Image: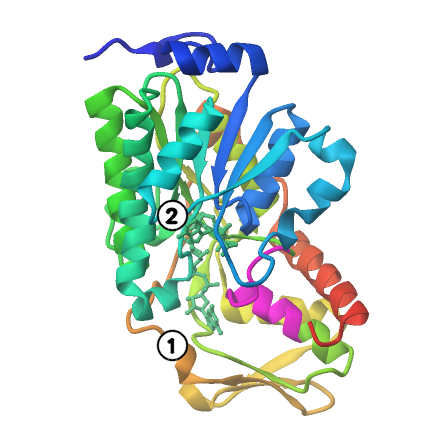
Amino acid sequence: RLSNNHNSKDLNGTTGTAGAGDAANARGKIALITGITGQDGSYLAEFLLKKNYEVHGIIRRASTFNTTRIEHLYADPKAHKGGRMKLHYGDMTDSSSLVKIINMVKPTEIYNLAAQSHVKVSFDLSEYTAEVDAVGTLRILDAIRTCGMEKSVRFYQASTSELYGKVVETPQNEQTPFYPRSPYACAKMYGFWIVINYREAYDMYACNGILFNHESPRRGENFVTRKITRSVAKILLNQMEYFELGNLDSKRDWGHASDYVEAMWMMLQRDVPADYVIATGETHSVREFVEAAFKHIGREITWRGKGVEEVGIERNTEIVRVRINPKYFRPTEVDLLQGDASKAKRELNWTPKVSFLELVTDMMNADIELMKKNPIA
Ligand code: NDP
Ligand code: GDR
């Protein structure tokens, strides 16, 4: 094996090749986050700023503002501590932008969170999803090598429970075989293995976090949990009569994003890099999530009918609140995810703090507030 600087006890990540080490020594810990404008990127930026990191984020050009989730970090001078957060234009499909940014920022830790992250959309944008999620991961790993920083930088890859796909065993742990069920999962499978390959080939400190679903009030509006909490908030405020969903029976292990970004950071603070499942260990169906969201506003949903004819009816009023629309079905579905995070508990001392019902409550309260302020949101 090549010399292995990640066995060093120096958790500042400041050892390694000259350029990067010098910059880090003078500046402290420096994180570069791809996907900083996304759900996880925003929580991670907040978390690292609190830990006194200098935080750099890659944002892509959009025709409207795409920085809503991190605006509060700019607005609060205490949070970004006098310009300790900086954004750079770049794209996972553009190698030269990645090389330029890494060379300029000289990060000590890179969190690769950028992705076309919607599973259903990946069936429509299959090639683009592979470009960003698979080849994009390769591009950033190569950019690190081009900058001569493979021995100094610590790399986190946003891997996913979607890798497990078709149920082989439950609960799923680091040894469970993968069986991806979407272009998204296949692209992430490439990302997973290229990270391991570069770790072994170039002795890089690189980790895969195999994160199960995690949600929050900042979750994208077209993921199922947020779609439900937004719709139920609108129903409470008489802004909507009913909403449509796809498969009610798929089961997910849902945690809170704020807990999960801490695990990402923990993975990069160890002596030796490894891959970890991050999950709550509990599983709930989409149907149960709907019921819990309605319960939060004091209503009860009962189900009637079968298949695409099934409806969710509000008890007492008999008003139909949920209908099935097959357009939300996926060509191949992932039926059941339930993670076993005992390795993360053992080696990182990580456990989730937010329960399923606390997650539903947090998301419901935030969406009720949002819809009160802005009924057309
Ligand atoms: P989001 O969809 O909320 O955020 C994705 C981020 O990637 C956004 O900042 C987006 O930018 C950016 N992005 C997309 N395409 C590109 C591109 N071509 N170049 C540069 N940036 C790009 O995802 P989450 O925050 O929920 O997830 C973070 C990561 O974790 C993703 O890789 C996801 O696949 C993975 N993951 C997520 C899980 C979850 O339950 N949330 C579970 C397991 C893994 P913009 O804001 O401009 O769209
Ligand atoms: P998922 O999340 O595919 O697990 O990927 P999503 O919330 O999109 O779907 C979860 C389950 O709900 C079912 N479903 C619906 N889904 C959506 N989006 N919209 C609907 O109307 C609807 N009705 C039912 C789905 O069929 C599915 O079974 C998320 C993403 O964050 C990935 O990036 C991440 O890797 C995985 O979680 C872990």
- Residue 50 lies, in percent from the top left, at 68, 29
Residue at image position (39%, 40%) is 97
The structure residue drawn at horizontal position 64% and vertical position 67%, both measured from the top left corner, is 229
- Please indicate whether residue 24 sits to the left or right of residue 20 in the image: right
Which quadrant of the rendered structure holds the N terminus?
A: top left
Does 2 sit left or right of 272 as displayed? left
Residue 319 rendering spot, x and y as whole percentages: 67, 91
Q: Is mark 1 within 8 Å of ligand 2?
A: yes
Residue 225 in magenta? yes
Task: Please indicate whether residue 4 sits to the left or right of residue 120 in the image.
Answer: left
Secondary structure of residue under mark 1:
loop
Marks 2/1: CA–CA distance: 20 Å
Q: Is mark 2 within 8 Å of ligand 2?
A: yes
User: Mark 1 is on which residue type?
Assistant: Phe
Q: Looking at the image, which residue is at 38% across and 38% down?
A: 98
Q: Nearer the viewer, residue 363 or 31?
A: 31
Please tell me in which quadrant of the rendered image residue 79 appears: top right
Q: Is residue 361 magenta?
A: no
Q: Can residue 346 be seen in this snapshot? A: no
**On screen, residue 93 above or below 236:** above
Relative to 354, say whether 180 is above or below: below
Mark 1 Cα shell of 10 Å, populated few (<14), some (14-19), many (≥20) = some
- How is the protein colored in the picture? rainbow
Q: Which residue is mark 2?
A: 160
Which residues lie in the magenta part? Answer: 218-231
In front here: 289 or 58?
A: 58
Q: Is 134 in front, or is 357?
A: 134
Q: Residue at x 51, y 68 (%)?
A: 286
> Upstream in the sequence, badge 2 or badge 1?
2
Is residue 255 toward the left or the right of residue 202 in the image? right
Q: Secondary structure at mark 2?
A: strand
Q: Which residue is mark 1?
A: 329
